[in-house]
Image (tube, rainbow, N blue to C red):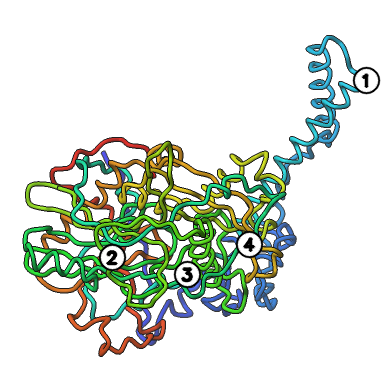
Amino acid sequence: MAAAFGVPQVAENLDGWGPDAASVPSQLEHVPYAPFSKGDRVGRASDWTGQAFKYNAGRFDRNNTGGASVFNFFHNEDEDSFHLVDTRPPPRPKYGGRRFQQRFQRRDRDEGRRDGGRDSGAGADRERQRRERLQQQKRGQWNAYWQDKNAPRIVYNSSVDIRPEWAVLEQIPLTSLSKLSYEVGEPEDITTCGTLEYYDRAFDRVTPKTEKPLERFENRQFYKVTTTDDPVIRRLLMENENVGTVFATDAILATLMCSPRSMYSWDIVIQKVGNKLFFDKRDASFDLLTVYETAQEPIPEEKDSINSVHSLSQEATFINQNFSQQVLQKDGKKFKFQEPNPFASENEEVASVAYRYRKWKLDENITLVARCELHSVAEVKGSEILLTVNALNEFDSRITGVDWRQKIENQRGAVLATELKNNANKLAKWTAQALLSGADQMKLGYVSRVHPKDNFNHTVLTLQGYKPKEFAGQINLNVNNMWGILKTVVDICMKLDEGKYLLVKDPNKPTVRLYSVPADAFENDYAEEPLPEDEQAPPPPAVDDKPELADTEEKDTEEI
């Protein structure tokens, strides 16, 4: 049976709030009231002695003004029976230093036994020095971890100002694209244009000891025409409306195919006209090469520095264009394709570039047509092979960590491994472009500054040739994954209505967003004034949904 509950007597105060003076117990009549603020920190629920927690006064009672000292009183009736209980922990013996010393001595003794009792001599000294180096390395790694954790994070700007009126249609995490896989058949050549000059094999023998200064070709014209401005693509559509469904350039396709490796922001304009898709670049900044993009320590955006992100991109593009023309023969021998350069004017010196217009069958209803570039041609055993030529550049060995002049001749693999770590996206895009163009070989040059503080004068240190398919396997670039990413983007865009859209890579997150933009966006009459940061449209919350790949096999491929 439950015990009965007796309701205590409750005093009722008709004249105010709280108990009246007659209902206050006698032992609490003279207890003073200490006012307090709601912002004060409460360090403990009660203080029985007023002295036991004095060492915490600075931490808990920063705003203490002494008002709580009025509670230091004792009730006379309970004073004789009160006993203070000592709650301090017992002191611990101080033997830490000797304990670690004994442990290291015991470890050294055991290792000496394994070495056959040799605890002295040059071998033992070398072993001790090796252990000391390992301990210093571990301490350095631990200190570097905490320094990186506390270092301020670098925030990059978006490649385009996102307008508040733009609606987000899709948001694709780049991590979900690394598992896609799709197999495409061999391409078919539609037409070829341009003229190529022959490669000079003397550059295969260049070493840091016989380095050559980088020449400038300021009179030669380099054309980077977007898709919808290409006269050949327009002519092909007029001649045969069913020649293709998706139109793009190799640079745009490589950016999409290698997007999981990208760190900087980029954007691609997508126009849907009827059942056809056109992928275009928005401005000339799309063609600038990135430098040190995937390094662990990113480069800050300093406008006035020669080692800023934008300055290094301009320098790398300048080096790449001049290098591709310097490695050619000067005897005037040229290899001509079916049609002349479609972008050149009369009496104009054009760079050695050829264009192959090729098409791929993605499925029964989608055909991709792309313009691909080639840079040179070489004679090998009586036949011509097509080449792509690109250049890696060194700007400061103290930042990159590897001095090319000292290691590129004897440790070329270590130099390439460092570049694969710091410029993974750039090398992957060059490889993807070589695969799309059907080049037989890709030439990679190593160009360095004459002085780390001089970004105008450079020297060619050496040059290396690779087969595109073998190099793709070496840098872990999966060809089926490249086509799987492109097929996913094409399938998403094919479901859209007619109009103009913008695909933007987030500058600080591994995410790609698809925006719906006005029809006159990015045109000459479209005034694109930069918005203040507080007025720009914030990015939508991240989603975990992976994009669906129609008719695509999903495999556990290696992550790009």
The residue identified by callout 4 is: 395
Query: Measuring 69% from the left and 68% from the top, which residue is drawn there?
Result: 72
Outermost residue on the top side: it is 116
**Residue 340 image label:** 2
Alpha carbons under labels 2 and 3: distance apart:
41 Å
**Does residue 154 appear in the picture of this structure?**
no
Answer few, some or many: residues within 10 Å of disc 2's Cα (few below 14, many 20 plus, some between 14 and 19).
some
**Does residue 341 appear in the picture of this structure?**
yes
**Residue 48 image label:** none
Of the image marks 2 and 1, the number of the one nearer the N terminus: 1
Q: Residue 472 appears at what percent x and percent y? A: 40, 41
Q: Nearer the viewer, mark 2 or mark 3?
A: 2
Q: Secondary structure at mark 4?
A: loop
* Res 226 quadrant in image: bottom left
Outermost residue on the right side: it is 121
Question: Which residue type does callout 4 highlight?
Answer: Phe
Q: Nearer the viewer, mark 4 or mark 1?
A: 4
Contact, CB < 8 Å: mark 2 with mark 1?
Answer: no
Of the image marks 4 and 1, the number of the one nearer the N terminus: 1
Q: Is residue 196 left or right of residue 481?
A: right
Q: Looking at the image, which is closer to me, 141 or 239?
A: 239
Q: Count the numbered circles shown.
A: 4
Question: Which residue type does callout 2 highlight?
Answer: Pro
Query: Measuring 37% from the left and 78% from the top, which residue is drawn there?
Result: 347
Query: Measuring 12% from the left and 60% from the top, which residue is drawn there?
Result: 494
Q: Looking at the image, which is closer to me, 228 or 500?
A: 228
Query: Measuring 48% from the left and 55% from the top, which residue is drawn there?
Result: 390
Of the image marks 2 and 4, the number of the one nearer the N terminus: 2
The residue identified by callout 1 is: 121
Of the image marks 3 and 4, the number of the one nearer the N terminus: 3
The residue identified by callout 3 is: 156
